[in-house]
Amino acid sequence: MLKYDEEVLPTKWYNVVPDLPEPLPPPLSRAQDGSSIELLNRIIPREILRQEFSFNRYENIPEEVRDLYRLVGRPTPLIRANRLEEFLGYRGKIFLKYEGATVTGSHKINTAIPQAYYASRESVTGVATETGAGQWGTATTLAAALTGLHSKVFMVRVSYDQKPLRKTVMALYGGEVVASPSVETKFGRKMLQKDPRSTGSLGIAISEAVEYALDHDMKYMVGSVMNSVLSHQSIIGQETMKQLEITGEEPEAMIGCVGGGSNFGGFVFPFISNGKIEMIASTASEVPKFSRGKYDYDAMDTAGILPYVKMYSLGSDFIPPPIYSGGLRYHGAAPSLSILVKSGRISSQEVEEKEVLAALEIFARSTGIVAAPESGHAIASAIRYAKDHRHDPKTVVLNVSGHGNFDLSIYGGRAR
Ligand SMILES: Cc1ncc(COP(=O)(O)O)c(C=O)c1O
């Protein structure tokens, strides 16, 4: 391995819990008997559960996992977007951390690998999960293939129809993909009975995947929200820190998009103790979880099978409009991130799809990167930031969580 890569690739995951301004409220079981907490023991690998409730600031990354990180393209590049700066007439600096450079095309592989790795060390028949945009499903199927596991993916119907090529990639990696709601689970059948034309939601797909994992002796792979997932994603922020250090740069603002909060948390949390850095979480206006959501205990999935967690949420029965950014349609935001937004340490911003499309176009023409629509929210917020700071230039670091090579239908005739 190149010396630079070896220096940049982290050896530990960072856990923000000990550095939060208030204790993280524990997950609660909806039933008095604690059954949904007990359920976690059945569907989540033991080591992942230990990490989930850990107060250690750092956890060692096993060397096998680091090897797989290298295999899928880590460390990912940090790039100075000087053409974008020029285009915007911005006198500050814009850097982008490009998670789309991993072989699956997004940050999701960063947690899929350790989850599949720890699952493969227990006696399981495979792993099951849900996917919105398809990025998480793709990461899961590859991580399963690399660790010798079978994988089953419930893909939100609206994305299943909008992004057929994602299914092809998942199948190529050996995954089995069905549209959710599906007839393969009790909960899916119930949802279809209520609305046979349901476009689905991440909450419904999670419920299906959990039920399926339980019935088939599989482990359930968690794409976002949980603390262990955000810790795994901390490799994004740690790499960024090292790369900035090597180039002698000090970040003043960090911007990322938020679905469940994993790429954003992973990107900014390692910098949380640096009070001088402004942190901006960009969400979809169509899913206004921070401005209209309630900070309270809510279910992570629509059926309420998983434990309740305290977070900003629009309600687990929230069915979002079918925006292209499937990955931002989730009803809540990770508990740790929610605390930091509530405390004011992290600010949030909403962006409409129209502004996102315009930002993606500018970004493509000035960097060459066709970014994922989810990442387009972060890009749009960065462009706003540059405009707002025209006379007060800062060093901005932007996380581009994935590429949009499978999302080209979003442009349907727009690109001239
Ligand atoms: C490319 C991309 N970015 C962002 C997200 C949002 O998820 P999270 O907030 O957990 O990073 C997703 C989710 O599927 C995604 O695919």
Image: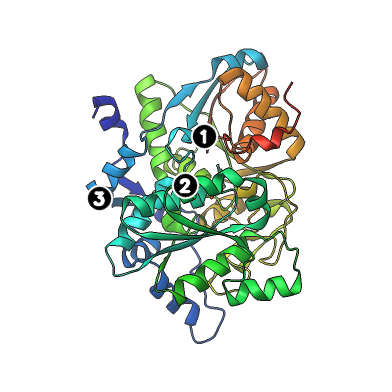
Q: Crowding at label 1, few (<14), some or many (≥20) Cα neighbours within 10 Å? A: some
Alpha carbon separation for disc pair 1 and 2: 25 Å
Residue 15 visible in image: no
| Rendered view: 224 above or below 391 | below
Query: Which residue is under mark 2?
Result: 108
Nearer the observer, 229 or 104: 104
**Does the Cβ of the disc 1 residue fall within 8 Å of ligand 1?**
no
Q: Earlier in the sequence, mark 3 or mark 2?
A: 3
Q: Earlier in the sequence, mark 3 or mark 1?
A: 3
| Rendered view: 208 above or below 368 | below
x and y percent of residue 372 in the render? 59, 37
Alpha carbon separation for disc pair 3 and 1: 31 Å
Specify the amino acid type for callout 2.
Lys
| Rendered view: 336 above or below 249 | below
x and y percent of residue 83 in the render? 58, 14
x and y percent of residue 280 in the render? 60, 39
Q: Nearer the viewer, mark 3 or mark 1?
A: 3
Specify the amino acid type for callout 1.
Ile
Figure quadrant of residue 355: top right
Q: Nearer the viewer, mark 3 or mark 2?
A: 2
Specify the amino acid type for callout 3.
Pro
Nearer the observer, 56 or 8: 8
x and y percent of residue 357 in the render? 71, 32
Q: Which element type, helix, strand or loop, lies under badge 3?
A: loop
**Does the Cβ of the disc 2 residue fall within 8 Å of ligand 1?**
yes
Residue 245 visible in image: yes
| Rendered view: 99 above or below 17 | above
Alpha carbon separation for disc pair 3 and 2: 18 Å
Badge number at residue 277: 1
Badge number at residue 62: 3
Nearer the observer, 291 or 51: 51
Q: Crowding at label 3, few (<14), some or many (≥20) Cα neighbours within 10 Å? A: few
